[in-house]
Amino acid sequence: MLGYTITQWLFGILSFLAIMFGLMVVFSRNPVNSVLYLVMTFFCIAGHYLLLNAQFLAIVHIVVYAGAIMVLFLFVIMLMNLNEDTEPQRTWLSKIIAAVAGGLMLFVMVGSLKGAGDMGLQQYGNAQIGFVKNLGAVLFKDFLFPFEIASVLLLAAMVGAIMIGKKEAGES
Amino acid sequence: MISFIIYKAIICLVVFLLSLGVAAYATLWERKFAAFLQDRVGPDKAGPWGLLQPLADGGKMFFKEEIIPNVSNRFLFILGPSLFMLTALMTGTVIPWAKDVNIGGQTYSLQITDINIGVLYLLGVVSIGVYGIMIGGWASNNKYALLGAIRASSQMISYEIAMGISIIALIITAGGTLSIREIIAQQDAGLANVVYQPLGFLIFFVCALAETNRAPFDLPECESELVGGYHTEYSSMKLGLFLFAEYINMFISSAIMAGFYFGGYNFPFAQELYDAMGLQEGSWIISLIGFGAYFTKIFIFICVFMWVRWTLPRFRYDQLMNLGWKTLLPLSLLNLAITVVVEYLRGNIHI
């Protein structure tokens, strides 16, 4: 079709949708709508993972981000009952600071992505690497140490969350 | 290519109609079953034995006045029940309903799609199912509806964890495959998985009750506290979609339990029976018998769901959370640890 393969078409459509929903997250006035657009963005990104043959990553992305984290976001926003009327007005100074900080972030990301080609990253395994079996074998054999470090990091975050959420002695 | 698309379209349509039909008649059977347990007759006026009651109920739902609260977000209000129904129907796509049929040299599998991460797909769809309730409850702009929605989603998230871990133990027993088709096919020879995973099955069953918001975990719809819960403001067919999707969820979770733990379309001495009847592999009669066996198991599970509902009183909310986090989660971790050790000693896990 028009000189492109189906994969390229899908990539184009998914990228367009992802960027569109990403913009909607920022521009929508209602926080609940923002969260729902963010969920749609995650779905588009999961589609990208599928195009890369990374089924496991795609499903886990949906389960963890769309299914758990965003639900908690929705919880907080629904319970606080945020809407246009209660939105705090920012001063011009804070808006300018936010714009500069965001611009710098963009600068850093573009810079790092531009240098990624020279970093000597190598493709690991074959095109089937995203399948659960191959991914598990690689993670638990070749990259066991980084994997364990990541799990210790997650464990620390979990313990921290429980410590913060726990009632202290004497607190009702 | 065209014949492939037609065959898949037919399978999709059949599974869709099957889910709707089973769900419709599950509502009738629920009322009959409740009547039986409470020594009543139950609905018996519409048609013989009340068999037309689901049609009458459906018609009533369609023709009732539809009220959309003035202040609510109209789009999200409509999206809520639709999303809930969509996710309920999406779970049926990965379940193999019977053995493959061989017609004219072509093999047709009686399953919409066999993705090799079917189990993960199920977990993914289940985790999205929360959104229908949350969006609907919030868009109702009613405090009871919001409370019901929040109860429903926190309950579903909490029980998903124990359910996921009990499924991991099952997958280890099943030799590491994530394809539902293979999990069921493996139980062809040998014992059903429930023999190896009794505790895992128990945890899965309790979690399935909680995930489908059935009694004794139906706190999201607790009438004495929350009027109607998340569907308080819904009327007409939108209410119908919420209620109907619950029955589809019940049907699909029964199908998953029967498939994962009780062998799906396999049954004891199946091969001997087929040999005695002189049937070849791929015959449609084998598929039909297997389908019947699968449906018998599903029917028994649906009955157990209903039996539990009309027997046990509702939990209190803190009891529900304690059960999920302090009992089922540690139990499922224990089950996982035991499974790993036993499978290692049996030589099925290689390090």
Image (spheres, coloured by chain):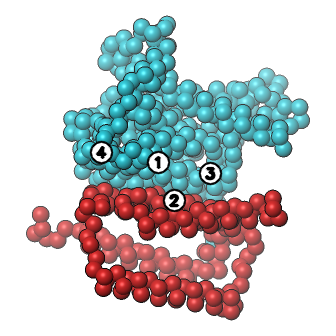
Chain colours: A red, B cyan
Left or right of B296, for residue B161: left
Q: Is tag 3's residue or tag 4's residue first in the polypeptide sequence? A: 4
Task: Compare residues B13 and A90 and report the one nearer the observer.
Answer: A90
Q: Looking at the picture, which amino acid does disc 4 mark?
A: Val
Tag 1 near tag 2, CB within 8 Å? no
Marks 4 and 2, how far apart in space? 25 Å
> Could you say whether the residue bearing mark 2 is in a helix, strand or loop?
helix
Residue for badge 2: A40
Residue for badge 4: B71
Label 1: chain letter:
B
Residue for badge 1: B129
The outermost residue toward the front is: A92
Residue A47 at x, y percent in the picture: 62, 61
Label 2: chain letter:
A
Residue for badge 3: B118
The outermost residue toward the right is: B105
Task: Compare residues A63 and B334 and report the one nearer the observer.
Answer: A63
Q: Is tag 1's residue or tag 3's residue first in the polypeptide sequence? A: 3
Marks 4 and 1, how far apart in space? 25 Å
Residue A93 at x, y percent in the picture: 30, 85
| Other residues around mark 2 within 10 Å, as few (<14) / some (14–19) / many (≥20) | some
Tag 4 near tag 2, CB within 8 Å? no
Q: Which residue is drawn at 38% across and 30% down?
A: B66
